[in-house]
Image (cartoon, grey):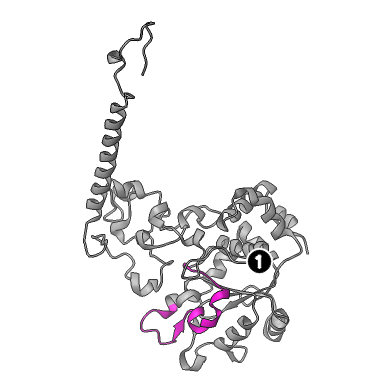
Amino acid sequence: MPDLPDRLAARGVTRRDFLAFCGSLAVLIGLGEAAAPEVARAVSGPRLPKVVWLNLGSCTGCTESLAQSDSPDIASIVLDVLSLDYAETLMAAAGSQAEQALKRAIFTGGHIAIVEGAIMTGEGGNVLRIAGRTGTELLHEVCAQARSVIAVGSCAVDGGWVKAKPNPAGAKGVLDELPDLRERLINLPTCPANPEWIVATLVSLLMLDRPPALDEMRRPVLMFGQTIHDLCPRRGHFTNGEFVERFGYPEERLGWCLYKMGCKGPTTLTNCPTVRWNRRASWCVESGSPCIGCGSPDWVDANAPFRLRTDAVRPGVLGMKPENVAQILAAGTAGAFAAWGVVETARGRMRDKDSTPETGDGDTTG
């Protein structure tokens, strides 16, 4: 099998592109861009983990985000090299051959389990059966001796779409089904999960033998530590009180803020605006859609209908219209500049040149 550099070259990926990608991975796991060569060696070297990818109650959207069969990105190629021993949707084997591949992959333990899709517990787990067993049985078997478990996508994290009311299938997340797994679990929500997050997490496990820093929800802090609103390129329009209120109007073409169109950016913690999708080409808001909050817990029931017009920002029990918040922010900024001007004037740094006293030698000082 060709090694990673050969595979990348065959896909038109230069060494410079690959090192830039490794630099971004290093930043995502908290090492800094200077660690790019070490990351490159880690994903190109022989010490690669066995990876078992389970598809449970899912639409396979996370797999599709990874595969991008017409034009795979660097993350997809790297994941393919990381000994993906079992992946129902992607593997060529089927039937008994696939089951044998799974048994070989988990026989000695120490593998990394990636779980996509909700855990289906309805009807005693019989809502989802794979190779004559329930999906829950398969999950327990694969995770029992796994070195780490990565819940990929919102469905695996907390049930996602499948858990939406009335949830007749009894869908839930990995941690709800396996609470003892907490210390080995890493959650990567959103619908779908970004392949770059998956590779960065695997690189952290490979290089550092531990996950990246996690928050209380077991999410990597550097990937899920800021709101989309914090990072959004449209935030300036929010501050100026410039909002899209109807699609198809000039404000939409001007790229104004989508908060009034239901954007959940202020309450959603992900770095989508900086990592993006499809070779970093774009992301939801840049393509013209309001954020629907798929990185938030129980996002379907909490955020639907996704494009419901939102007229108020509610910090605590106080209700404020977005434009009022923007006016307050703008007034605060103007006030800060005014205060700065007073201080600088008092320090003598903003005197008019004509009013500056002359020195004894005829020079002026500012």
Q: Is residue 10 left or right of residue 168?
A: right
Which residue bears the numbered disc 1? 209
The residue at the far right in this view is 1
Residue 3, position in %: x, y?
Answer: 76, 60
- Residue type at mark 1: give it: Asp
Residue 172 painted magenta: yes
Q: Is residue 209 above or below residue 280?
A: below
Q: Residue at position x 30%, y 56% from top? A: 247
Relative depth, front residue between 65 and 37: 37
Q: Secondary structure at mark 1?
A: loop
Q: Position of residue 37 (x, y in %)?
A: 69, 51
Q: Is 303 left or right of 156, judged from the image as shown?
A: left
Is residue 150 covered in magenta? no
Q: Which corner quadrant of the image does residue 11 belong to?
A: bottom right
Q: Magenta span covers which residues?
A: 162-191
Residue at 61% in and 81% down: 143
- In the image as oriented, which residue stretches furthest toward the top? 361
Within 10 angstroms of label 1, few (less than 14), some, or many (20 or more) residues?
few
Is residue 72 in view from this perspective?
no
Q: Total label count? A: 1
Give the percent coordinates (x, y) of residue 91.
67, 74
Where is residue 58 shown, x and y percent of the image? 51, 77
Which one is nearer the viewer's eye here, 319 or 357?
357
Q: Is residue 284 above or below residue 175?
A: above
Which image quarter: residue 205? bottom right
